[in-house]
Amino acid sequence: MEQAVLQKPQKRSERLKKAPPRLEMPRREDLLPLFAKYDVPVPRYTSYPPATQFTNRFDGSDYITHLTQFSGDGTEVSLYVHLPFCDTLCYFCGCTVLISNNREKISEYLDYLKREITLVAETLDNTPIVVQMHWGGGSPTHLTPQEIAELGAHIRKTFEFAPDAEVSIEIDPRGLTIEHIHAMRSVGFNRASIGVQDFDPDVQVAVNRVQPRSMTEQVIDWCREAGMTGINLDLIYGLPYQTTESFTATLKTVREISPDRIAVYNFAYVPWIKPHQKLIGIDTLPIASTKLALLELAIQELTDAGYEYLGMDHFAKPTDALVEAKRSGSLHRNFQGYSTLAGRDMLAFGISAIGRVENAFVQNVKELPEYYKMLDEGMFPVERGYELTADDAVREYVIMQLMCNSFVDKDEVERLFGMEFDHYFRDALSTLEPLTADGLCYCDESSVTVTDRGRYFLRNIAAQFDAYLAPVEQGAAADGAVKNMFSRAI
Ligand code: SF4
């Protein structure tokens, strides 16, 4: 494999010369066969390389090396805080989650989490500026209001925040109180992502997540009153008992509630990885053609309602910051999804959390006893990580350009990485040809551009530039080793 010369990318505003075209809704009869053809297992590309490439040869000492190298005064940084606890188990859940209402157990975790935060901060030689923080899980709102306020205060005391930092939290409306909102305000949360999945009562019972519409509306009202913007609702298609009729009703409710952003995720049924998903009877899941119809319905309903399709599974109002970032070519992607803030180093805390420092990914251990033991011994609780090679760096850049901006400027890649694009990516350009023939993208002398139709297949297009993915025959049955690692594209 040829090696590129690794260089620091320039600002996106400087490098995007050609804005991607505005999305037109492709015709239904064109899309459906393509959905079936390209429904193969591929990574979600929240990172490149995907986390499946991380290795335990990377440990805490490597992390320390990167932390000390990276920490310049005023370096902009993002924080991710993983809070794994939930009240009850949603049967579809794919997260690293611990079901517990043992407040002592939760309190113990928070003590160790604060210790990890302090340990990382003390390892930095200088003072970075936090421009973005996200709390995910699990359910961050399974903490008590007091726990939220205290953890937030600890982080705010430990790190310096930019006045306009984006501070976001995942909310489970069940059990949320106005006191939680007050605690969130004290921490400075100004973005919220709210789990819904489906409003249909039968679907909610089948996935063990009963959450009436009125509860969701109340929480959204509270968030808005607290001055939060960019409010996101999560939906999932492919859940048990979903039909086109029931999902039409759910989408109608979503339109009435009118969140700023909507994510419509594909239900990844992977019981070989998440055994609790066996609690969902396989015969209750919608058949493949229904699932495709649900996706098509979501796209149609949400674009009809004025939402813009950002790519992958995300929609946003035209006035939302994510849409503006997409238009200006500055949309970014990280482990939490799409973001307006590009290329920030991310310090991640808590079990299973994945961070990025300079050219290295780092992931924490996933089990509480190990997490506690390592911190007790004064060690970083690192399980594995990955240092990007020069080849990874150029492929990461190209894949993120496709995933975020639907466009790759070949000249820019050549200038940034010191290579000849068509020669370097001759294999990828060759495997891209069938996708080009299907009208998903086009390549000319200066660019690779995703078409309107191709934006529904970003993962498939990006996969052609992935050096680690065994060639997937597009349209073939989803079998083999890849099945064990990635969810299907549609
Ligand atoms: S609330 Fe979220 S993290 Fe918790 S079990 Fe349900 S889906 Fe998983």
Image (cartoon, rainbow, N blue to C red):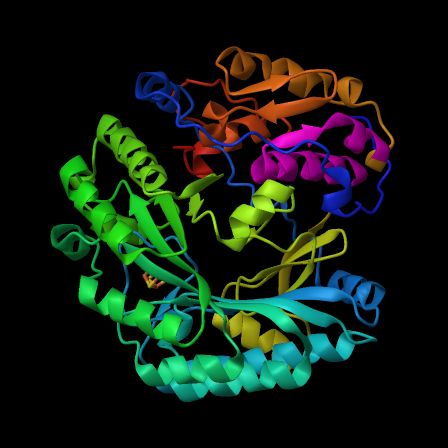
Which quadrant holds the C terminus? top left
With respect to residue 66, does 331 lie above or below?
A: above
With respect to residue 407, does 260 lie above or below?
A: below
With respect to residue 479, does 113 lie above or below?
A: below
Which residue is located at x 74 percent, y 63 percent?
A: 63
In magenta, the rendered stretch is 388-415
Inspect the magenta stretch and tell me whether residue 214 lies in it. Answer: no
Which residue is located at x 56 percent, y 86 percent?
A: 153
Figure quadrant, ligand 1:
bottom left
Inspect the magenta stretch and tell me whether residue 400 lies in it. Answer: yes
Magenta-colored segment: predominant secondary structure:
helix
Q: Is residue 176 visible?
A: yes
Identify which residue, 139 or 303, lies in the foreground: 303
Residue 430 located left or right of residue 122 = left
Residue 448 rendering spot, x and y as whole percentages: 65, 23
Residue 363 rendering spot, x and y as whole percentages: 61, 59
